[in-house]
Image (cartoon, rainbow, N blue to C red):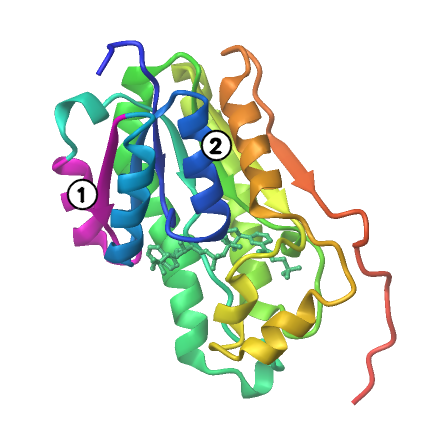
């Protein structure tokens, strides 16, 4: 692998936005570290994308700190110069009211969207700083970070964390040449709703009916753009919504 080939480390590359980022960055010539829990999907990605660029895959549950430490420590030498970290692994679980929510769902969202994201970030920061200037951390936020909705409770709160963490992180690593972006999509057609609705395909499919949601490729295009800008340009927050969606207006709450 050429010394100057940039490396992108993507979490949650097995589906949706992470999967689209893997394809888009490969087409742009980036070498890839692709991670996720589903090994068979990592294998399929490797078989396809290795035809274009060097690819290293690692099964990784971001909520397991030991797993994260091991995967980063065992990165093969050419993949250690990480120029872009795409902190994409994340999920929502449940959309019922807070008072009946499953606490285990809440803990899993926090363990994945917050604890997982900060753990991966902390382990990779020295490598990003070494690869800079112009290295980039792209954290997948959401419009849910600032738009409350019924059933949004902990999911929206985890994404508010992602936004503030991104801003604070930039204060520390910016002077070291590392950019940080909160990439915040609205409704994007992926496995997100299927996961949120615990595998209920009828609800998941009907969610997008009669709408034109963003596609994961739309967000991947933005991620590549953010990571490819001149090193002195830092997109701090990039919110992207489908034209059919809007932030909710204040509404009357009724029991
Ligand atoms: P998908 O469900 O399609 O993909 C989620 C990815 O995250 C999968 O690859 C999954 O891989 C991975 N993942 C989940 N939990 C873990 C874990 N514990 N460890 C490692 N990987 C994990 O959803 P999206 O592509 O839509 O979601 C990607 C990101 O975008 C998330 O952070 C989400 O919150 C955010 N987002 C999504 C929006 C949408 O409308 N879809 C809108 C705004 C933000 P595997 O199961 O193999 O581990
Ligand atoms: C996902 C977007 O609006 O479904 O982050 O919460 S939303």
Residue at left offset 24%, top offset 55%: 39
Secondary structure, mark 1, is helix
- Label placed on residue 101: none
What residue did someone put label 2 on?
24
Q: Return the disc, 1 or 2, that comes first in the chain's sequence.
A: 2
Q: Nearer the viewer, mark 1 or mark 2?
A: 2
Are there few (<14), some (14-19), or many (20+) residues within 10 Å of tag 1?
some
Is label 2's Cβ within 8 Å of ligand 1? Answer: no
Are there few (<14), some (14-19), or many (20+) residues within 10 Å of tag 2?
some
Is residue 111 placed above or below 23 in the rendered structure? below
**Residue 64 in the image: x percent, y percent?**
24, 57
Circles 1 and 2 in contact, beta carbons < 8 Å:
no
**Residue 55 in the image: x percent, y percent?**
26, 32
**Residue 17 in the image: x percent, y percent?**
50, 46
Secondary structure, mark 2, is helix
Residue at left offset 61%, top offset 56%: 189
Quadrant of image for the N terminus: top left
What residue did someone put label 1 on?
71
* Quadrant position of residue 234: top right
Is 73 colored magenta in this rendering? yes
Q: Nearer the viewer, residue 197 or 69?
A: 197
Q: Is residue 212 left or right of residue 12?
A: right
Range of residues picked out in magenta: 54-74
Q: Nearer the viewer, residue 211 or 251?
A: 211
- Is there any visible trace of residue 61 in the rendered image? no
Residue at left offset 68%, top offset 53%: 146
Is 216 colored magenta in this rendering? no
């Amino acid at each position: 692998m050429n010394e100057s080939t940039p490396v992108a480390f993507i979490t949650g590359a097995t589906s949706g936005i992470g999967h689209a980022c893997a394809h888009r960055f490969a087409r742009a010539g980036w070498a890839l570290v692709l991670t996720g829990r589903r090994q068979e999907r990592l294998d399929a990605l490797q078989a396809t994308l290795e035809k274009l660029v060097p690819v290293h895959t690692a099964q990784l549950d971001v909520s397991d700190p030991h797993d994260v430490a091991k995967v980063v420590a065992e990165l093969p030498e050419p993949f250690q110069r990480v120029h872009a970290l795409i902190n994409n692994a994340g999920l929502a679980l449940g959309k019922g009211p807070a008072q009946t929510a499953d606490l285990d769902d809440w803990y899993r969202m926090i363990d994945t969207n917050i604890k997982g994201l900060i753990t991966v970030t902390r382990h990779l920061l020295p490598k990003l700083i070494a690869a800079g200037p112009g290295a980039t951390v792209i954290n997948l936020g959401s419009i849910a970070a600032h738009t409350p909705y019924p059933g949004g409770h902990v999911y929206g709160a985890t994404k508010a964390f992602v936004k503030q963490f991104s801003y604070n992180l930039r204060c520390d690593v910016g002077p070291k040449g590392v950019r940080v972006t909160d990439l915040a999509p609205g409704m994007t057609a992926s496995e997100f709703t299927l996961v949120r609705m615990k595998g209920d395909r009828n609800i998941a499919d009907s969610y997008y009916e009669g709408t034109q949601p963003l596609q994961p490729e739309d967000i991947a295009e933005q991620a590549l753009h953010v990571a490819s800008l001149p090193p002195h340009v830092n997109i701090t927050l990039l919110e992207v919504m489908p034209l059919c969606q809007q932030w909710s207006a204040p509404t009357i709450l009724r029991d």
